[in-house]
Amino acid sequence: MKRYIILLCVPLVCTAVAGINISSDSKDIECLAKNIYFEARNDNLAGQVAVTDVVLNRVLNASYPNDICEVIYQGPQDSRGNMIRNKCQFSWYCDGKSDKIPYPSINDSWWRAMNLASDMYYNDAYRGITEGSTHYHASYVDPAWSKDLQLVGRIGAHIFYRKK
């Protein structure tokens, strides 16, 4: 007897569980979700929204790439094209640790990140919470670049800035 497996997919679910690329929308959502997951998975909802708002603000700003994934993966490369460790725009991307989501099909933090990314991408939910911020850092660090920017404020575990 032959058995058939019918795969019925919603783009978000296929990307998260099966790794199937359905569209560029799902790629953008996955990039946003990874950034939420690695930058703010333990933060409150406002903190996760704020981190995502910065990425979307950068996409709309001429100083940055106009593509969500390019904004997130932006950073200097060495002569062989490898990312220079700890020099990326978003620290998780080139910190030397794995960027693989552990157990994505049963990882609640990952699913929350995917849902929030989708909601902000498709519905502009919560947009504007950072008042145009294009930069942030964790509250426990004090980077030199922050002196050149206008402080917007603290949301969750991060401090947000915009250009003066």
Image (cartoon, rainbow, N blue to C red):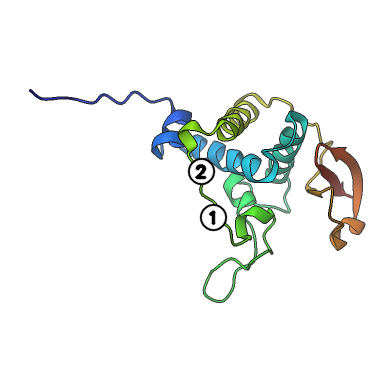
Label 2, residues with CA under 10 Å away: few <14, some 14-19, many ≥20: few
On residue 65, the disc is none
User: Which residue is depicted at the point 68% across and 55% down?
Assistant: 91
Q: Where is residue 98 shown, x and y percent of the image? A: 54, 55
Q: Quadrant of the N terminus?
A: top left
Dividing the picture into quadrants, the one containing residue 132 is top right
Q: Amino acid at mark 1?
A: Ser
Query: Does 82 appear above or below 73?
Result: below
| Helix, strand or loop status at disc 2 | loop
On residue 98, the disc is 1
Q: Where is residue 141 shown, x and y percent of the image? A: 84, 55
Q: Would residue 158 appear left or right of 2 to someone viewing this image?
A: right
User: Which residue is depicted at the point 64% across and 24% down?
Assistant: 123
| Helix, strand or loop status at disc 1 | loop
Q: Foreground: 136 or 22?
A: 136
How many numbered discs sit on the rendered protein? 2
Q: Amino acid at mark 2?
A: Pro
Dividing the picture into quadrants, the one containing residue 19 is top left
- Residue 79, can we see it? yes
Label 1, residues with CA under 10 Å away: few <14, some 14-19, many ≥20: few
Q: Where is residue 127 shown, x and y percent of the image? A: 74, 30
User: Which residue is depicted at the point 52% across and 44% down?
Assistant: 101
Q: Would residue 1 appear left or right of 60 to someone viewing this image?
A: left
Q: Would residue 68 appear left or right of 163 to someone viewing this image?
A: left
Mark 2–mark 1 distance (CA, rounded to whole Å) = 10 Å
Q: Where is residue 161 shown, x and y percent of the image? A: 85, 47
Residue for badge 2: 102
User: Which residue is depicted at the point 69% across and 52% down?
Assistant: 64
Query: Does 23 appear above or below 140?
Result: above
